[in-house]
Image (cartoon, grey):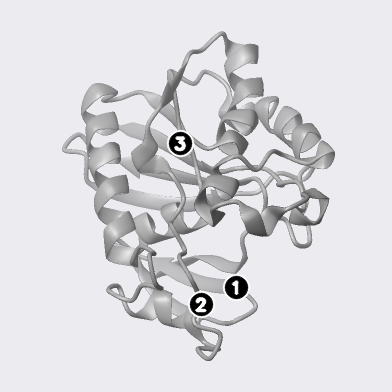
Amino acid sequence: MTIVYMIRHSNKLSSDYYLNKEDIDSYIRDKSRILSIEGEERSKILSQEKELQNIDAVYTSTMVRTQSTAKYLCSAQNLKMYVDERLNEKKTGIVNPDLKDWYIIQYKDKTFKNINGESQEDVFNRVNDAMTEILKKNKNKRIAVFSHGYAITYYLLHFCKLIDVNNDRKLTIEFNGKIFMDKILNAPEVFKLIYDENNNLIEVNIIEFKDLPYLHGGI
């Protein structure tokens, strides 16, 4: 049995604090977004949670906010961080301002993409490639994978069923007939995935921590 904790990064610094943000490529800007002060503190708390002790390997995307979230756990458990760009967040691209329901559409249509953006299918394929390698290298171990909201949920939706999604970004998702998510993503958010001896996904849950309550607008 292999256990993977897919962890969405902690709270980002608001874009309101950046000057000339319109002059920088949106994806480059997104890759460099740092954590807020509260996000740093929540990452530190996360690293101390009992559920996340005795981790064998840590993987992160190339984005600053995931590595900043992971650094506390790595430091506390003396672990090295494997960085993989396939775990990066979705390239949202240029949103058509006339398409009011684009957030919903991207979850219901796996091939939909904005201009210069990625589709759900695109993101799943690269994340799945990374996860397949991670599982092969770490059989019967406990792994922490720090990634992003779209990247994680798009990966899960290949194995799970989307029940509902709305423009408030609330997602309702079930696995094997059991709803394990019915909310807006937290920051950080921890998904516990259990795989059998053949690396088939057999269980999915969200792990809630009392000392990390929902952070409104925690994106």
Which residue in the protein does label 1 denote?
A: 169
Relative vertical location of residue 152 with respect to residue 211 in this rendering, above or below: below
Q: Residue at x 53, y 46 (%)?
A: 28
Which residue in the protein does label 3 denote?
A: 61
Instruction: State which mark lies toward you, 1 or 2.
Output: 2
Callout 2 crowding tier (Cα within 10 Å): few <14, some 14–19, many ≥20: some
Q: Position of residue 2 (x, y in %)?
A: 32, 32
- On screen, residue 207 versus residue 14, left or right, reads left
Q: Is the N terminus in the top left, top right, bottom left or bottom right quadrant?
A: top left
- Identify which amino acid the numbered label 1 is placed on: Arg
Mark 2: secondary structure: helix
Q: Position of residue 126 (x, y in %)?
A: 27, 47
Q: Are marks 1 and 2 in contact (CB under 8 Å)?
A: yes
Q: Residue at x 65, y 78 (%)?
A: 168
- Identify which amino acid the numbered label 3 is placed on: Ser
Q: Is the C terminus in the top left, top right, bottom left or bottom right quadrant?
A: bottom right
Q: Nearer the viewer, residue 143 or 1?
A: 143
The first of marks 2 and 3 along the sequence is: 3
Q: Is residue 190 visible?
A: no
Callout 3 crowding tier (Cα within 10 Å): few <14, some 14–19, many ≥20: many
The first of marks 3 and 1 along the sequence is: 3
The first of marks 1 and 2 along the sequence is: 2
- Identify which amino acid the numbered label 2 is placed on: Tyr
